[in-house]
Amino acid sequence: MHTHCPYCSLQCGMTLQREGRRLEVAAWPEFPVNEGGLCRKGWTATGLRGHRERLTTPMLRDRTTGELRAAGWDEALDLVASRLQELQQESGADAVGVFGGGGLTNEKAYSLGKLARVALRTSQVDYNGRWCMSSAASASNQAFGIDRGLPFPLADLERAEVLVLVGSNLAETMPPAVRHLDRLRERGGRVVVVDPRRTPTADRADVLLQPVPGTDLALALGVLHLLDARGLADEAYLAARTTGWDDVRRVAAAWWPERVERVTGVTVGELHALVDLLTSHERVVVLTARGAEQHAQGTATVLGWIDVALALGLPGRPHAGYGCLTGQGNGQGGREHGQKSDQLPGYRMIDDPAAREHVARVWGVDPDDLPGPGRSAYELLDALGRPDGPRALLVLGSNPVVSAPRAAHVADRLRSLDLLVVCDLVMSETAALADVVLPVTQWAEETGTMTNLEGRVILRQQAVAPPAGVRSDLEVIAGLAQRLGSPVPFSDDPEEVFAELGRASAGGRADYAGIDYDRIREEHGVFWPCPSPDHPGTPRLFADAFAHPDGRARLVAVDHVGTAEPTDAAYPVHLTTGRVLAQYQSGAQTRRIADLPDTGAFVELHPSLADRLGAYDGEPVAVTTRRGRLVAPARVVDTIRPDTVFVPFHWVGVNQLTNDALDPSSRMPEFKVCAAQVEAVARAARPSPGEPVEVAR
Ligand code: SF4
């Protein structure tokens, strides 16, 4: 059975085959995105099947003992529906919130948004993809009029002459994609990595620039300054295909190279060399990822790099352009079909009367009955249990106790709820706080579509039956909708839901109307937009026009402001966070897979900083921010800036340190940088490998 990896947005194709009672992962060489390659997470993905911690029974928290007890499905769903209705009768429709995830299939994301708007009639719905790459989405919508992570197939990268990766550690986050970098370099191409750390990706680069965390926008402005000052911008392209260049060059005029060096640490010589490299080749690709995007100025930072790409005349040119490397498995599709607070299916905006009319007609409801926009993900969590906030929350496919910024505060908000309902495979840290836990299927046990980082809609196919007692998220949603007295039916059949999603998306920016399961199987995925069954799909965007009504791209003038929490005498070090190869996101799945090493959190720091602190490799250090304190073993490496420490975020406690300052446009929190103190602590405090790190607030 051909299917796809359950984790990241590459959505590598794989074959699942039975070996006796075991389910084994094998290669699927014909699937073009990964050509049979998988990273260790993909090869070990069946490790959760039959896992002793797998949930197989609904659980309700006993009001007397405070403990969770097993319950039947009817009892659990009846209780959830009746409590939600009571709370809404007392406090209004927005007393109930819904929190989804960027790993949910398109069908689940669509049904969850419909459940919120039609059955619950709440505006309070959002999802953790808001924390993944919403800044790139916001920037792409502003610049190009459409948000598709890569506007070209991933394989186009290897035909580029220069690839610039801003804040991406592709080698550790998407190893099968690295072959494109290697092939590009074998053809004589050059790779530039912009990252405060010399990562395994940087080891494969020809040029590494290590700016101060939070200054990627200043670097982009420096590039724009030199393009203009040296007369190297593509003026013909700018005149024919864009608007806004004059505004951008006015801002960039103030970013002379010496100022850029002072702010970013990238020298004047390095900046000139970068501009020389970019302007001496036709086929240049600029890609951003979380390093550039997860900032309070994330949207502006991405816009700055899009401005660079447009000033060079790249978008729309073959094997050139700008793209974003989406993170979560369905980070792309998850933001297209209605689980985001401001959107309806097809990437329609919920405050657009025509969009409301269209979607309401497909759903069979009155458009006036649809709620308006709600709170963004962090703002929704921050409002829980407050006088004007939701009193109940339904969580699918997310573990915010680990993954939210200022996570201890988020856990407190979750504890303040009258009702927390969590659907999950295992007892995640968020499920452990719930009043009701509902056990749901995992990827190999279900069918549904995902949309990978290229905008390719692919099909996850059920390979095995779920354990007895487990239901799919679609069954849970349909069961709740029916109990809530939804005015329209909800299907729990994924193919039926996908067909409805296609109708709801028809005519929208992300148009899936021409895609069906058989086409996906036959064509190894179909690129949206695909408005009709006879449409071939759209692997490449922007060749002739951008998606704004006038067909032109917008250069948007943005200026560097700096991080929301600059370093100071009390908190003198930059803390940045990210991923490691063997773990994925909150680790709820990968930390339980025996074949994946679980090291626990660690603190990467430069030898000169370690010397100053009296810290030693492997010995505990404490990282303290204005929100919390974490003790974890030091990893002394010369690959990081001396003014910066790095901690991977897959473990409880790390995000208790991170800052909840939000980007004004995307509402993305500033995960990537905050101010910290670091100190060596006594050996006795050192955690054992795999043991939760000590966290004090
Ligand atoms: Fe591919 Fe990502 Fe899965 Fe690794 S985690 S196998 S890169 S989809």
Image (cartoon, grey):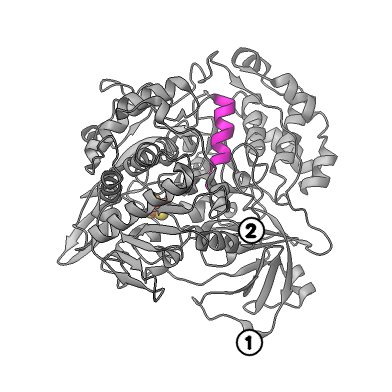
Query: Which-is-in-front pick, marks 2 and 1?
Result: 2
Is residue 142 within the magenta segment? yes
User: Of the residues shown, which amino acid type is indicated by label 2?
Assistant: Thr
Find disc 2 in the rendering and name its residue. Answer: 658
Q: Secondary structure at mark 1?
A: helix
Q: Secondary structure at mark 2?
A: loop
Residue lying at the far left of the rendered structure: 20
Q: Is residue 473 visible?
A: yes
Residue lying at the far front of the rendered structure: 90
Question: Viewer-proximal residue, 370 or 442?
Answer: 370
Percent across and percent down for residue 356 are: 42, 25
State how many labels appear: 2
User: Of the residues shown, which amino acid type is indicated by label 1?
Assistant: Ala
Structural crowding at the residue carrying mark 2, measured as other residues with C-alpha within 10 Å and reported as few (<14), some (14–19) or many (≥20): many
Chief secondary structure of the magenta span? Answer: helix
Residue shown at the point (39%, 51%) measured from the top left: 86
Percent across and percent down for residue 80 are: 34, 55
Residue shown at the point (40%, 44%) measured from the top left: 330
Quarter of the image for residue 301 reads top right
Q: Which mark is residue 616?
A: none
- Residues in magenta, as a range: 132-144
Percent across and percent down for residue 481 are: 30, 44
Question: Viewer-proximal residue, 230 or 613?
Answer: 613
Q: Which mark is residue 684?
A: 1
Q: Does 319 appear above or below 134?
A: above
Which quarter of the rendering shows the C terminus?
A: bottom right
